[in-house]
């Protein structure tokens, strides 16, 4: 019994320690976000990887989400005779919740895992140590461009996802079923206010920070991971951890931001 | 080979103690390296030699003791000062630590691009000179994944010397290489010492290359220094541990030189664990 | 060449993102980039505006012409004060009626403006003289049930 309790305690201590390391990591990067020189080329490359290359899959995902949303809501709404409200229902749920959450989860899975593995390999191959020894700050050299690129990419991707999703809803409601096109757009334009757009924007920024923080942090702190080996196995383990932890944090933060902004 | 004008050691280590968690890794270690010499730090796995190297480089923080390199207190100095010091230090890591997304020449150019305001042409010429020294001319655009093990080591060496450092560190230079390539690498290191007048510190468990290139050898065991001295001094030491390390014998059993060599090459095949605890 | 490719795709991505952002901001967030100074405000006082929201439509003859910009409560007269934005080119006579209507049974509330026959027009900031409050469905139903009980 005592043994069991101490094992639980050890786990908690270890997790707290890990969280502490991650927090220190975040603070270090954030403190260097605005330090010159600005690495324009590196940010560009990361924008390409995190943003541009994610666009296609985000468009694909959000159009199907919009379609599914349109179909389901239409079935319910037509029973009540309020098909005309389809536009606003689709737009509201996309802009406030589904757009940011789905985009963030996709980016976490696609770019987040890759970033985590990349940084993890750099840690296990001593590339990060090599940078240090060349008097190059790995935070500034590697992390800051990734942070900037993610913070710029995710809101843009969310905006694209929202618009494409709304178009998907249009396809379902207007093209497949019989919602009048005007009613759909009126619903979209009429129901969305600044508040909703703001909420989506705040969420996308928060999610972007979570994605890049957990992904790079987990990789960066690979050597402090006590659960096992250091090499390729360690990289794959922390990458999995990062995706799971990042996704859970995104969902949790989504609820939190909704609660704070609505209340 | 010692610099006549400056007789103070380039590296001074005093009572250095480090822990990994609760485990004692280095135990009140003293060490000094003179300018212009090749110091080889030897020891078996777990002897603390990799930790010593990392602490010298400022990558690990010691529990107590001091490390002074070229007059800079590595253990207590600010990040900025540490970075300034490191510009005069080259490090060749065990696995090369080349950046996978940069080509060979970009890897070598990186320190110059980051730390100097030289124009592209000068940087290209300087990095090509170093690549040529390491016999890597013509491979500029290859990616690290396309290089052989020996080429990776030489490329890492080229990158380490591109800023013309006064002091070079090598972590297991011959690990993972076949004996011929390893011997070649030893020659490169000796050439560096001769042509660039560098002080070189090598961490290795490779006896053969240690005897070939060292001016002085330091032997570590369980975080303590067993002996430090010239190659001959170490060879003649009657310390049991040193003799065991030299002869690779567990007990009385005598080995012929051939058997001895065979054993050395056998050990080479096993790459040590590259963790933080020790390698 | 690879350099150019990266820059091209990043540029494309950023443009697509910004187009999406500005589309939402202008069309949905009503950032009045194009119609900023072309409206004037009118005020209507209602006994009840239950269900009416800021941003709701103001319609004439079934066409959306303006929107509700604010809804406040007048604590002295216990009335709801609704401010509406009407385009400058639409002139309303002073005997126009503003009534709150619903699209469908549980749909959105909007304000329907019916034009009168007077020769004078409402000036910016003026109040509608006649208003009709929103129909309260619960009230209607209870009235109906009450009447049905009396009849029986």
Image (tube, rainbow, N blue to C red):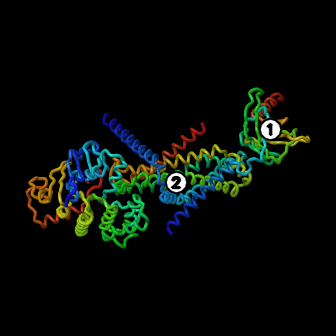
Give how far apart the Cα atoms at labels 1 and 2 are.
50 Å
Please state which of residues C88 and B277 is positioned toward the viewer in this rendering. Answer: C88
Q: Position of residue B127 (x, y in %)?
A: 37, 66
Question: Which residue is located at x 82 percent, y 42 percent?
Answer: C113
Please state which of residues C114 and A131 is positioned toward the viewer in this rendering. Answer: A131
Residue C105 in view (yes/no): no
Chain of residue at mark 1: C
Left or right placement of residue A46 versus residue B187 in this view: right
Q: Residues within 10 Å of mark 1 (few under 14, many from 20)?
A: some
Farthest residue toward the front? B5
Q: Which residue is mark 2?
A: A106
Question: Which residue is located at x 81 percent, y 31 percent?
Answer: C148
Left or right placement of residue B159 versus residue B50 in this view: right
Residue B137 in view (yes/no): yes
Q: Position of residue C72 (x, y in %)?
A: 73, 34
Q: Residues within 10 Å of mark 2 (few under 14, many from 20)?
A: some
In which quadrant will I find the C terminus of chain C? top right
Please state which of residues A28 and C146 is positioned toward the viewer in this rendering. Answer: A28
- Mark 2 residue element: helix
Question: Which residue is located at x 18 percent, y 60 percent?
Answer: B215
Q: Position of residue A224 (x, y in %)?
A: 35, 47
Left or right placement of residue B255 versus residue C45 in this view: left
Q: Quadrant of residue B179?
A: bottom left
Q: Which residue is mark 1?
A: C125
Please state which of residues B252 and A85 is positioned toward the viewer in this rendering. Answer: B252
Q: Quadrant of residue B120?
A: bottom left
Chain of residue at mark 2: A
Of tags 1 and 2, the one toward the viewer is: 1
- Mark 1 residue element: loop
Farthest residue toward the bottom? B138
> Residue B19: which numbered mark, if any?
none
Q: Position of residue B134 (x, y in %)?
A: 30, 68
């Amino acid at each position: 019994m005592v043994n069991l309790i101490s094992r639980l305690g050890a786990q908690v201590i270890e997790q707290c320690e890990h969280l502490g390391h991650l927090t220190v990591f975040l603070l270090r990067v954030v403190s260097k976000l605005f330090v010159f020189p600005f690495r324009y080329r590196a940010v560009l490359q990361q924008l390409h990887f995190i943003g541009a290359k994610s666009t296609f899959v985000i468009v694909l995902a959000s159009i199907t989400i919009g379609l599914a949303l349109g179909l389901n809501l239409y079935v319910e709404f037509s029973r009540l005779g309020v098909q005309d409200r389809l536009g606003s229902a689709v737009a509201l749920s996309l802009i406030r919740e589904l757009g940011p959450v789905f985009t963030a989860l996709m980016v976490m899975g696609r770019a987040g895992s890759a970033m985590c593995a990349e940084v993890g390999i750099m840690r296990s191959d001593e590339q990060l140590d090599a940078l240090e020894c060349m008097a190059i700050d790995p935070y500034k050299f590697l992390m800051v461009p990734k942070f900037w690129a993610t913070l710029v990419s995710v809101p843009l991707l969310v905006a694209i996802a929202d618009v494409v999703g709304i178009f998907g809803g249009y396809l379902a409601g207007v093209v497949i079923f019989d919602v009048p096109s005007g009613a759909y757009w009126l619903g979209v334009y009429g129901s969305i206010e600044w508040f909703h757009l703001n909420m989506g924007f705040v969420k996308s920024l928060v999610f972007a920070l979570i994605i890049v923080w957990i992904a790079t942090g987990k990789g960066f702190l690979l050597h402090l991971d006590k659960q096992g080996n250091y090499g390729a196995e360690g990289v794959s383990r922390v990458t999995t951890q990062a995706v799971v932890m990042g996704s859970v944090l995104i969902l949790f933060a989504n609820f939190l931001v909704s609660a704070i902004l609505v209340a | 080979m010692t610099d006549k004008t400056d007789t103070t050691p380039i590296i001074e280590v005093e009572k250095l103690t480090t822990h990994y968690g609760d485990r004692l890794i280095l135990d009140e270690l003293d060490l000094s390296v003179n300018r212009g010499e090749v110091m080889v730090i030897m020891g078996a796995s777990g002897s603390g030699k990799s930790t010593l190297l990392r602490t010298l480089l400022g990558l690990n923080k010691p529990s107590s003791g001091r490390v002074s390199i070229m007059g800079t207190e590595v253990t207590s100095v600010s990040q900025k000062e540490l970075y300034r010091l490191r510009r005069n230090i080259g490090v060749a890591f065990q696995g090369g630590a080349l950046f996978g997304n940069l080509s060979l020449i970009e890897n070598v150019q990186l320190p110059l691009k980051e730390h100097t305001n030289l124009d592209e042409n000068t940087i290209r010429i300087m990095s090509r000179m170093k690549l040529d020294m390491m016999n890597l001319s013509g491979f500029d655009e290859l990616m690290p994944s396309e290089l052989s093990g020996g080429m990776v080591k030489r490329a890492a060496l080229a990158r380490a010397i591109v800023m013309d450092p006064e002091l070079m560190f090598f972590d297991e230079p011959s690990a993972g290489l076949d004996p011929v390539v390893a011997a070649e690498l030893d020659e490169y290191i000796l050439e560096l010492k001769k042509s660039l007048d560098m002080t070189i510190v090598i961490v290795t468990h490779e006896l053969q290359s240690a005897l070939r290139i060292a001016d002085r050898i330091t032997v570590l065991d369980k975080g303590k220094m067993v002996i430090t001295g010239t190659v001959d001094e170490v060879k003649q030491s009657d310390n049991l541990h040193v003799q065991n390390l030299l002869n690779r014998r567990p007990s009385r059993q005598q080995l012929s030189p051939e058997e001895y060599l065979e054993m050395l090459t056998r050990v080479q095949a096993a790459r040590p664990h590259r963790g933080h605890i020790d390698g | 060449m690879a350099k150019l490719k990266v820059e091209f795709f990043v540029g494309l991505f950023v443009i697509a993102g910004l187009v999406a952002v500005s589309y939402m901001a202008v069309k949905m967030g009503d950032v009045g980039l194009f119609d900023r100074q072309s409206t004037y405000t009118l005020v209507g006082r209602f006994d009840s505006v239950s269900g009416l929201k800021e941003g709701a439509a103001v319609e004439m003859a079934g066409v959306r012409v303006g929107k509700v910009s604010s809804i406040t409560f007048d604590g002295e007269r216990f009335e709801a004060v609704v401010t509406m934005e009407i385009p400058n080119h639409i002139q309303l006579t002073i005997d126009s009626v503003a009534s709150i209507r619903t699209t469908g049974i549980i749909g959105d509330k909007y304000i329907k403006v019916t034009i009168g026959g007077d020769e004078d027009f409402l000036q910016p900031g003026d109040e509608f003289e006649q208003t009709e409050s929103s129909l309260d469905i619960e009230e209607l139903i209870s009235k109906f049930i009450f009447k049905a009980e009396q009849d029986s």
